[in-house]
Amino acid sequence: MSDKFKTTRRRLLLSAAAIPLVTLAGLTIPVAPAWADDSVLYGPSDPAAKQGGSLTVGSLIEPPSFDIYHQAGEAVNFVAPLMYQTLVYADHDGNPHPLLAESWEVSEDLTEYTFRLRSGVTFHTGQPLEATDVKYGLDYMRNPDNGTIGALDFADLEEVEVVDPLTVVVRLKKPNSAFLITLTHRNGSVVPRNWFDGETSRTELNSKSVGTGPFKLAEFVQNSYMRLQRNPDYWQPGLPYLDEIIINFIPNSAGMLVAARNGRVDMAVLVRPQDADQLKNDTSLTVQRSRSLNQKSLDLDSTYGPLEDERVRRAVALLIDKEAVMQAAISGYGQVLGMMVPGMQDRWGVPLDDLPNQKVDVEKAKALLAEAGHPDGIDLELRTIIGYDWMEPAALTLAQQLQKGGVRVTIERLDLGTWLQNFRAKKMGFTLNDWGTPPDPNILYYRHFHQPPEGADFRNWANADGSRLLDEGRQTGDDGKRREIYNEFQRLLAESVPTVMMFGSDHIVVVSDAVRNHTMHPIGWHFGLVKTWIDQE
Amino acid sequence: MRRFLLFRILASALTLLLASLAVFLMVRAVPGSIVETMMGQMGSTEGEAALRRFFGLDQPVYMQYIDWLSRVLTGDFGVSWRQGSPVLSLVFGAFIVSLQLALMVLVVSSLIGVPLGLLAGYLAGGVIDTIIQSFNVLFLATPVFWLALMLLFGVSALFHWSPPTIYASPGRSLSDNIVILLLPMLSLAFLQIAAYAQFVRQHVVEAMQQEYVRALKARGVPPKVILGKHVLRNILVPLITFMGLIFIQILGGVVVIESIFGLPGLGRLLVNALYARDFPVVQGALAMILVSAILINLLVDVLYHAIDPRLRT
């Protein structure tokens, strides 16, 4: 990391407190959810559900560790919610519901959140959950000197105050309409107070769990499997249904398919959705397909060569047939995107046809390139990440499409570590990307596209209008107004092209006949296993 | 013999030291570190700096090496940066899996491959020789990963069966263990059988031209005795060298097989650790591979001396 970047970040922290709060007019409090209804948590309940049984899940990816405060990554996210809980749960439509909180109140200016905690909740360690634990977790996580992964998520926290053992108030430096949804991410997981003071506390999390979740970690064998056991003291009556979940790390697709076919696993999460084609004819298996919050995108760094010119970026967008790329990459098991991820499209997205630069137009692209001073076309290096299977066919298809308009592409394959280093250093170049988001437009866009120091602006877009819209969206509580703001932002993205959101892959889960009531949350984490049961007859 | 051994051990130690330095530098020359893989896309700069300090990555590389080496010399290989488990037990646990598989492959392929080679060499030019050679050419050219996939899919389609996907050590369940290792063993064995057969055939063909074989033949010694007692003994030295090489090759080549069949062996440990930039584990695993390669070479040399009286001085 360059020194220059460090200074910028530090300046942000020093100056943040000095920025006066923007005066806001016409704020409304978000509609309060129906507090009593816990049945929406973790998906639909099943009155016919029977308790007991063991479920084996095949997973292509393996969590590096369960140090949930210091280890990022989807592989951890998948499983962590079964063991660790947050104050708030987001349902499949992105609405917040109380999880460890019992209810909350939000101040009119969206800066003060008062949470009332559930009573009678205990950690896997046996100690009861209290407001002090919540404060400890948030304070630990938001202090970047602890090397935590979610420090930036909570950078706007002013203070966390314990009012009484079951009441905690969180004050923000600036209004944030997405704060409740921010808390649904596992970075907001609550652990027993002072947990990370212990010398070996980080590594202990690989042999036991200390959350409040419905399952406890029983065993974690690297390069092989992990075993979760039902938490007998879990606070939701009758849940979870399963006694045991075994997550079997099967490192390749072929092995996974064969294991699913021969009943070695009851459930297989397919990272390559097109593998479902191979299981379609198997009558003992059901393929579940659902929308995700994922996006596979093509990112354009505005400081990378000719991409500096907006006309060039627009030309690139005009050459891309998203549907064809999706077919090549994931055999069509996904949704073509405009400028919003599939799971949020209905609520927040502008329809594809209403956005500029979405239809292939080779002549216009050529004209734009010529206008930008490249009548003979341009040469670009397109980056892909090794291990992301979809990227290779996508890159080849893109290269063909771009070639037609005079954009000549060579493919550069990077491993994830190298790619991440470039990403963090804001040297993304011209690259394929694969990412997801908790279900809120502020969380989706803000850090990625807002100018520094508030955002990271990974693509060096430096768009002041964009930043203004993102600030407005963040400070607005009213859903209707927020939608208008984010619609305008999406049009701006489509016009200026810092990124081309191509498609989002669907979640594909293959289950055996005995598996009942399994739903996949759009975010792709295993919330649904809390209410899954096994028909043992 | 003792001087020879002493010399070899000292040379091996020096090799290890130099190799460890090379490995240490190479691992750190790879872009990215565990900090990026832990922080993901959303890390903060301060957080990264904190983690860098936590893992000692803020120190100059030579300091890191001296620190690592001084610990290793006292037998402390450190802990995995991802999981905190001791590197030594991780590496040993994984090595045992790979070693068992490699030994199974070695035994099966030499038991089948050597006789095939003897037969083909003795009957060189005949129909049987042609059949055996066709087998050799076919399997020497077949990629191991392809064969593994075909075996996996083929067995699944024919018998509606596939091996358990959770590894069981022999101590936990010997029958499960054998069942789990059967397909991986076969996937590797075909290539090695072919390699042995080809190697042995070549040497037998050469041996058959030698005076002593002609003399034996003239004396009416039965072919079984000529092959088993005289020819085999004469090619034993190159064969053992070859076995040593092949064994090291199997140990190194199990990576793909381990990943296809989901075995928690040394190759998979190494690859996953490398992806996560879990340096202590990478260094530990590479050290293990180096040490075993050196030990096998040492063993081969010692066996030479035991087998070939001409080398005893």
Image (cartoon, coloured by chain):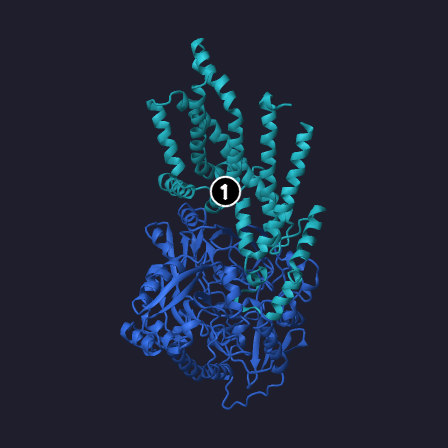
Chain colours: A blue, B cyan
Q: Judge whether A48 appears above or below B163 on screen.
A: below
In the rendered view, tell whether residue B296 sits above or below residue A235. above
Q: Where does residue B136 sit, x and y in percent of width and height? A: 39, 32
Compare residues A531 and B131 and report the one nearer the observer. B131
Q: Is residue A147 visible?
A: no
Q: Is A497 drawn above or below residue A244 in the view shown?
A: below
Q: Which residue is at the front of the view, A59 or A73? A: A73
- The answer to whether residue B214 of the structure is visible from this angle is yes
Q: Amino acid at mark 1?
A: Val
- Chain containing the residue with disc 1: B
Position in image of residue B172 (x %, y %): 57, 39
User: How many numbered discs?
Assistant: 1
**In the rendered image of this protein, does residue A460 appear above or below residue B61?**
below
Residue B11 position within the rendered picture, expressed as x and y whole percent measured from the top left: 65, 38
Q: Residue furthest left?
A: A363
Q: Which residue is labeled 1 in the image? A: B254
Looking at the rendering, in which quadrant would you find the N terminus of chain A?
Answer: bottom right
| Percent of width and height locating residue B219 | 45, 8
Badge 1 marks a residue whose secondary structure is helix
Disc 1 residue crowd, few under 14, some 14–19, many 20+, Cα 10 Å: many
